[in-house]
Amino acid sequence: MPVIAEIEDLRRLYRRRTPRMFFDYAESGSWSEQTFRENTSDFAHLRLRQRVAVDMSNRSTASTMIGQDVAMPVALAPVGLTGMQCADGEIKAARAAEKFGVPFTLSTLSICSIEDVAAHTSKPFWFQVYTLKDEEFMRRLFDRARAANCAAIVLTLDLQVLGQRHKDLRNGLSAPPKLTLKSIANMMTKVQWGLGMLGTRRRFFGNVVGHAKGVTDPASLSAWTAEAFDETLDWDRVRQFRDMWGGKFIIKGILDVEDAQKAADLGVDAIVVSNHGGRQLDGAMSSIRMLPRIVDAVGDRVEVHMDSGIRSGQDVLKALSLGAHGTYIGRAFTYGLGAMGEAGVTRALQIIHKELDTTMALCGERDVHNLGPQNLIVPQGFDDPTMRL
Ligand SMILES: Cc1cc2nc3c(=O)[nH]c(=O)nc-3n(C[C@H](O)[C@H](O)[C@H](O)COP(=O)(O)O)c2cc1C
């Protein structure tokens, strides 16, 4: 068994163990992948301020996200098709998150259904919804989330139309995977993955097939997805969704100060500064560079969370120091899941926690709540989208 010291080790193992089509699905951004790359590389422009001879005993990473206690302010982001990265993937990831004490967010486009994840976990999870045209389907989704005791809705606003990812087109991505000579040849080399998939009945989009009008099988599903997203969405409609749910409500996919202000005006519980991990608008700014301005504009009115590009506990610390109240990881836990199932997600969380804790100590901080601009050296123009770094 190779030594797993950092998230990159999990990524390498994941690449070896998972069919190419699903590895590529996670490990890509839209078009030229500029935003996907800059989401991670921009973190490196932020330097940490080393402090010495300060009491660094009794450290704590414990915090809250939307009023919920968390072992560290790092939630698992909604990731579609998680159950294709590893059999029963959503259940495994949710269990790892629950044991670790961080929130798990289930995607609308998951393989395991809301009910299935609820039946195999014991703590309320969060449920992510897309803004779909089908009113009845949306209402039923909220009802199902309520019945499953979900603690919050995460409404994703940055995917009304789909950003193109070239690799998915070339690979003919689908769930379950289309059987072509190329995909069969590749899958035959992924024995553990294949055995897992043979041993589960969860191979379709569990929240959609059998629930959306006219979607009874995987073939009708692709027609539905092409039509389902609501291109006419506006803030009134967002308000309707918030009222339809009535509980804790998080808006995901904010990258602009004006949009952040509109979201804060709605009185939601949190916003997530995010560009969907560089999978939607290629050429958009990295989340970490947009974070400070958004915190400045609305941080006193709404909890500001951020994701996109986090690959280490040091990245988490940088985001918190720039004012994020919480963070999310998407790919970092997906690598762990594809590499080692539930144990891999746990390992990803342990790695990030240890890096966060040790970095806090070396920065002379004992409590995650005390992190702030004093812990960073920020290059001039970092938070100015018109400046090149
Ligand atoms: C493979 C994959 C699938 C995703 N599916 C969804 C989804 O179904 N809903 C959603 O709101 N965001 C989705 N996202 C975006 C994530 O929630 C999150 O914003 C992103 O992964 C953060 O960037 P990171 O992967 O660099 O951590 C997906 C991301 C990936 C990598």
Image (cartoon, helix red, strand yellow):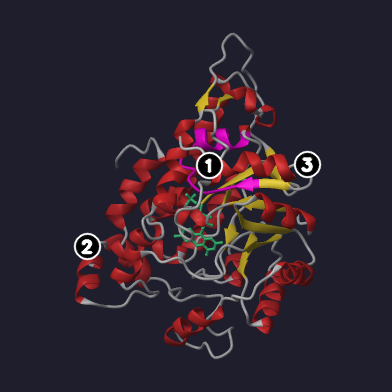
Q: Which residues are magenta?
A: 305-320
Q: Position of residue 379 (x, y in %)?
A: 52, 28
Closer to viewer: mark 2 or mark 1: 1
SS category of the residue bearing label 1: loop
The answer for how far apart the CA atoms under marks 1 and 3 are is 25 Å
Nearest-to-viewer mark from 1 and 3? 1
Looking at the image, residue 141 sits to the left or right of residue 338; the answer is right
Q: Which residue is mark 1?
A: 386
In this rendering, the answer to whether 69 lies above or below 187 is above
**Residue 314 location in percent, x, y?**
51, 33
Q: Quadrant of the N terminus?
A: top left
Mark 2: secondary structure: loop
| Residues under numbered marks 3 and 2 in contact, where contact means CB atoms less than 8 Å apart | no
Is residue 302 shown to the viewer in this render? yes
For the residue pair 316 and 286, the one nearer the viewer reads as: 286
- Tag of residue 300: 3
User: Which residue is disc 2 drawn over?
Assistant: 189
Q: Are marks 2 and 1 in contact (CB under 8 Å)?
A: no
Q: Residue furthest bottom?
A: 214
Q: Nearer the viewer, residue 381 or 192?
A: 381
